[in-house]
Image (tube, coloured by chain):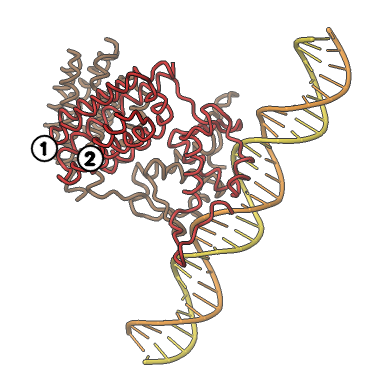
Chain colours: A red, B brown, C orange, D yellow
DNA sequence: ATACGAAATATTGTATACAAAATTCAATAT
DNA sequence: ATATTGAATTTTGTATACAATATTTCGTAT
């Protein structure tokens, strides 16, 4: 079947359970935008496509519902969860607060080498910005933010941040495509890189939170 | 079967799906301490007790796993998730940050009547403290904290806070049983009530965060 | 007695079957 | 033409069956 384990040489890579694989696949379909918010999740079509039976598929939907990506309407099928503008704003409010904490912790706990690596990412972003290469910039941007959260060394923070990020991913993507906002974002990043180098957690946290809430104004019309 | 819907007069109360009922029941068993961390979740025993088949039961386990209350070990059964001291500390770190945000938002968004009600709860807590009635105090304490989060009017914040709170509930309970820490907690609450009345969000947030991190020292030995 | 290993047993993961909805669609009445 | 009703069909929720793994039990050898 489609999802079954690969083999590398004679060594089994296995690891992920069928449940985890199905969850990952459906989550990707949602996060990457193949399944649009509000659209019906066609069980028979997807179990066909994934080559699994209803049991693991429905269990996967339960975990995605708990993650907030799917809405299961009793006896009326499941849909990709649709976010109201209010909910998006609520999520950004929380996300900003979490990134602020992450920033403070990262400044306390990261090694010099780790900080150097973040700065390197930032500098690469500047190059892509100079060349106006949106997509590679966008990828690195995500890596930068995820990096700061990782450096917090707080697994709960990492998990919750990851979840909110996944829920918002499509919207953030739309937001970052704006035209002249890009320059603002870059200068905010410049500030962040400097704060990180001086390990000024309070400052970094403040900028990070402001940076994120600014995306709201950048994104608002895409969602309102 | 055990879980089936009640009837009030001739009116069906129904509402909750079987899945939600099973999730709620198992969650209660965990949160209230009937199922201890690390202990095996005996599928056949519990489906017997709940009167449901394996399908809805296992789906319930999936959502509880996503909530972080249950750990499903592939092909080796499920256990009540066990928290390491590090994880507990991580959760408190995040929870403190979330309560800080909640405090700031509550001061901005709550109505005068809502604030008055919170103050009333606080005053009742003082009475129970004077009479040294731990249990009623403890109940109101929870209501007070949940109240502040509710007043933030941020559904995402409310959801995440509720989840972390559920995961920590047993431990917080243990912590609050300490002897002379109680006085400290009460005086912190006194400060919080005052800050709320003056709508000083920054101050309230700071106290709330400090208050929560103090529970760590109160709780540390119960968990280390 | 203790350690080992194979058969017996129990548990887990997935597929399927069946019952109870909801939805679709077509025929009829307005 | 539009609305309405009621079968036909599809979809959903739950139970059960079956196959694959783990775990236990018990007999044997050291």
On residue A192, which mark appears? none
On residue B180, which mark appears? 1
- Looking at this view, is B95 or A161 the one in front? A161
Q: Is residue A83 visible?
A: yes
- Looking at this view, is B22 or C15 the one in front? C15
| Helix, strand or loop under label 2 | helix
Residue B177 spot, x, y in % from top left:
19, 40
Q: Is residue B174 visible?
A: no
Number of marks in picture:
2
Q: Nearer the viewer, mark 2 or mark 1?
A: 2
| Helix, strand or loop under label 1 | loop
**Which residue is disc 2 drawn over?**
A120
Within the image, what quadrant is residue B175 found in? top left
- Residue at horizontal 39 percent and vertical 47 percent from the top: B70
Above or below, B2 relative to A217: below
Above or below, A19 relative to B101: below
The chain letter for the residue carrying disc 2 is A
**Residue B2 horizontal side relative to residue B194, left or right:** right
The crowd level at tag 2 (other Cα within 10 Å; few <14, some 14-19, many 20+) is some
The chain letter for the residue carrying disc 1 is B
Within the image, what quadrant is residue B26 found in? top left
């Amino acid at each position: 079947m489609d999802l079954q384990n690969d083999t590398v040489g004679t060594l089994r890579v296995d690891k992920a359970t069928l449940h985890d694989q199905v969850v990952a696949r459906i989550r990707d379909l949602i996060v990457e935008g193949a399944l649009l918010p509000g659209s019906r999740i066609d069980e028979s079509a997807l179990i066909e496509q994934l080559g699994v039976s209803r049991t693991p598929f429905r269990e996967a939907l339960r975990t995605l519902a708990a993650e907030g990506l799917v809405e299961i309407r009793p006896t009326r099928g499941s849909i990709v969860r649709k976010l109201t503008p209010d909910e998006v704003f609520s999520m950004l409010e929380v996300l900003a607060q979490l990134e602020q904490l992450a920033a403070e912790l990262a400044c306390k706990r990261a090694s010099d080498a780790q900080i150097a690596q973040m700065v390197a990412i930032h500098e690469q972003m500047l190059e892509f910005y100079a060349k106006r290469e949106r997509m590679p910039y966008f990828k690195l941007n995500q890596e930068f933010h995820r990096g700061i959260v990782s450096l917090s060394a707080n697994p709960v923070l990492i998990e919750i941040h990851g979840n909110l990020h996944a829920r918002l991913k499509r919207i953030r993507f739309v937001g970052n495509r704006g035209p002249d906002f890009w320059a603002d974002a870059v200068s905010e990043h410049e500030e962040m890189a400097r704060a990180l180098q001086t390990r000024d957690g309070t400052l970094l946290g403040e900028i990070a939170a402001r940076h994120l809430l600014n995306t709201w104004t950048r994104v608002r019309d895409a969602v309102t």
